[in-house]
């Protein structure tokens, strides 16, 4: 490093005058391009520089200087402009978390997944008595509270859904078995009046081990685009 | 403005005003308006003394100010009250400065008052000087410029889903309960309602049934095994309801024996009561 | 020149790793500062850099790198921003949207607010020795350089005025302490004179926190149409 530094100093000393003079024109170009509200063409730039200056050569030099910087000098539609380096485009985005309430349909579906897991979409629909849109399940997958467990050993081999650890965390449950049963739901006044015969609330289990009637997921299952990127609105 | 007037004793506005006056324009007011109030006028007069404000003679300044006001009056210039108030105060100050101080004066001494005035003038002078320096700084949009094409930061909104355990449980309970009741009431399943079934059999066989345990069989064949107890229960409940209404008779030989049902003398249509035997 | 370029390439190869790493953080800073519409504070900049990075040191390095360029990295209102070099003002005047010319009264009032804030209208008038027209203060509020701060705890509860961040930004001041001649004014005892008796507090101060002799503004105060659209978020 010491040697390197020294070399630089020598280099710097040698053509100091030339450097300084060049710098002035480059400074002008820099300032013009920086302050401009739109890309500038070479003619406009040339008008602000001393006569006889090779604008294109200067621009090329400036472009070279900025090539490895966070901002690059680029040519668009024949005009010149400074732009954020394309590999740093991520800097120009900001994530923000917007609290959003789950829709009624999504909450219902989630509760059915919680109590009845492993459960297929058809089973969810059967219990809810209404068609469940794919969007609703996508939203639930996006929350991270519901996951694809496996596939039911049944015609069509439908995917089975279950809840995740994040589900327990979010709802403050120590274990899935802590979800209240029928008596507790009644006690809480959530189920009122006579309960039809045969009405039962299952004792839920989110044991990750696949059930006898479940097959493991197949390699492609998780990449089906089932997990939406963001901002998915449901139904 | 009189700021550049040279002669301390002879105020410049005389010469400056001579011309517009000659042109028949009463432009004298404009001249006074060139001052930003009596302090400004005093400051201008003080500058004409060409000395440091710290060493200024307040007495001389008061004289000049009063002379200026006198001139203005002669020319019938309209002066704002502020200027006249200052003139009165300066006249008072002058008299105090010229008279020997009483041994135990009440309130501030003439010296104090003069110093206070000098201090005020210095403060205004300083503020003006630094205001000028401030304005001479490179100003944004005048001398220096920011990025002409700022690149906006795009905001990606990630939803943070919220739901409470109460939401979850009440939704579950409500849905299950609704579903269970719907199940009892609505015949829109793949099975026929018992009423429909009875009607169909009547049409097929051509007879109406007497003391028939038929519902047992209908349930057996038309209802999904898991649903049978529910259907049986609701069917029984509906039957009892019809009995109470006097439209059906039931007969059971022993506990848990098959239940026989027949229409009463004035037979009601089977389908008349929509609550009957849904399956 | 050809020789110089060659030597530099060799230099570049030698300590590539270190160079690259440093460069990446500087590139990020560059990109952020170029893209931003407003000056950025160190916290905001730091959030986009790897943890543990000395943001200030990097900014100083960047400031040094840009010192002789057509665009400089400057600190205003405690934040960082890129500005065209002030010696190139001549070059860019054509671009300028001629700022409103302030009247002498407005300029004086502005500087009194700047040097004596928080200051009431009566205090401004005391210093100027003349009544301040409402229009003058309105014009200043409209520039966005002056804001209503609060109300003085004094008979009549007069409104107090102060300067904004936009004021510092516009005049390229890092902080109020950089006001020209401030020390001189203080030394001559010309500033303390405006402080109401019994309050030994530093003046001027644009600290958004109200001073002990200030009350908050009342709900109606900001709706008088006196308030310019921007920069009034802090109360």
Image (tube, coloured by chain):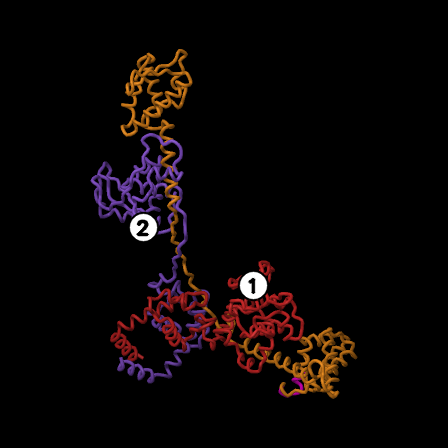
Chain colours: A purple, B orange, C red
Q: Residue at x 41, y 53 (%)?
A: A98
Residue C216 marker: 1
Q: Are marks 1 and 2 on the same chain?
A: no
Q: CA distance from mark 1 to mark 2?
A: 45 Å
Q: Is residue A130 left or right of residue C215?
A: left
Q: Residue at x 73, y 73 (%)?
A: B81
Please provide percent x and percent y for residue C152: 59, 67
Instruction: Point out the stretch of residues depicted in magenta.
Output: B45-52
Residue B64 seen in render: no
The residue beneath circle 2 is A166
**For the residue labelled by badge 2, is the local secondary structure a helix, a strand or a loop?**
helix
Is-magenta flag for residue A39?
no
Residue C116 seen in render: yes
Given residues C34 and A157, the one toward you in this image is: A157
Looking at the image, residue B195 lies above or below residue C88? above
Quarter of the image holding residue C79? bottom left
Looking at the image, residue B185 lies above or below residue B261? below
Residue B132 marker: none
Please state the chain letter of the residue tagged with numbered disc 1 in the rendered image: C
Please provide percent x and percent y for residue A184: 35, 39
């Amino acid at each position: 490093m010491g040697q390197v530094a020294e070399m630089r100093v020598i280099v710097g000393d040698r053509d100091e005058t030339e450097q300084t003079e060049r710098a002035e024109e480059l400074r002008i170009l820099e300032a013009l391009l920086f302050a401009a509200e739109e890309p500038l063409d070479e003619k406009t730039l040339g008008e602000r520089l001393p006569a006889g200056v090779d604008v294109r050569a200067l621009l090329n030099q400036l472009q070279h200087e900025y090539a490895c910087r966070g901002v690059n000098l680029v040519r668009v539609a024949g005009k010149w402009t400074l732009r954020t380096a394309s590999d740093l485009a991520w800097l120009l985005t900001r994530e923000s978390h917007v609290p959003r309430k789950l829709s009624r349909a999504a909450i219902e579906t989630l509760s059915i997944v919680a109590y009845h897991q492993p459960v297929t979409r058809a089973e969810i629909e059967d219990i809810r008595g209404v068609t469940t849109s794919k969007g609703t399940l996508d939203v639930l997958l996006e929350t991270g509270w519901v996951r694809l467990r496996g596939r039911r050993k049944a015609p069509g081999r439908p995917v089975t859904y279950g809840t995740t650890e994040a589900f327990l965390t979010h709802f403050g449950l120590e274990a899935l078995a802590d979800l209240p049963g029928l008596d507790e739901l009644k006690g809480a006044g959530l189920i009122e009046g006579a309960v039809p015969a045969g009405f039962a609330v299952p004792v839920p289990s989110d044991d990750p081990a696949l059930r006898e009637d479940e097959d493991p997921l197949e390699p492609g299952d998780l990449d089906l685009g089932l997990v939406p990127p963001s901002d998915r609105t449901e139904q | 403005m009189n700021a550049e007037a040279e002669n301390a004793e002879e105020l410049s506005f005389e010469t400056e005003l001579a011309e517009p006056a000659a042109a028949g324009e009463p432009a004298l007011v404009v001249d006074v308006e060139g001052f930003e109030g009596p302090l400004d006028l005093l400051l201008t007069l003080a500058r004409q003394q060409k000395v440091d404000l710290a060493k200024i003679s307040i007495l001389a300044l008061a004289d000049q100010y009063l002379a200026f006001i006198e001139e203005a009056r002669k020319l019938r210039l309209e002066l704002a009250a502020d200027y006249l108030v200052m003139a009165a105060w300066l006249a008072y100050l002058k008299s105090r400065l010229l008279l020997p101080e009483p041994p135990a004066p009440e309130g501030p001494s003439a010296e104090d008052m003069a110093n206070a005035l000098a201090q005020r003038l210095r403060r205004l002078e300083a503020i003006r000087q630094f205001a000028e320096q401030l304005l001479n700084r490179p100003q944004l949009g005048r001398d220096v410029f920011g990025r002409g094409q700022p690149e906006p930061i795009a905001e990606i909104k990630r939803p943070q889903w919220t739901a409470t355990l109460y939401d979850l449980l009440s939704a579950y309970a409500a849905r299950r309960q609704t579903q269970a009741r719907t199940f009892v009431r609505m015949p829109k399943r793949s099975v026929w309602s018992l009423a429909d079934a009875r009607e169909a059999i009547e049409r097929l066989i051509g007879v109406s049934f007497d003391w028939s345990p038929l519902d047992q069989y209908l349930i057996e064949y038309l209802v999904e095994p898991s649903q049978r107890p529910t259907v049986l229960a609701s069917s029984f409940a509906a039957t009892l309801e019809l009995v109470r209404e006097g439209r059906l008779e039931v007969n059971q030989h022993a506990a848990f024996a098959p239940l026989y049902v027949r229409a009463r003398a004035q037979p009601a249509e089977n389908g008349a009561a929509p609550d009957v035997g849904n399956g």
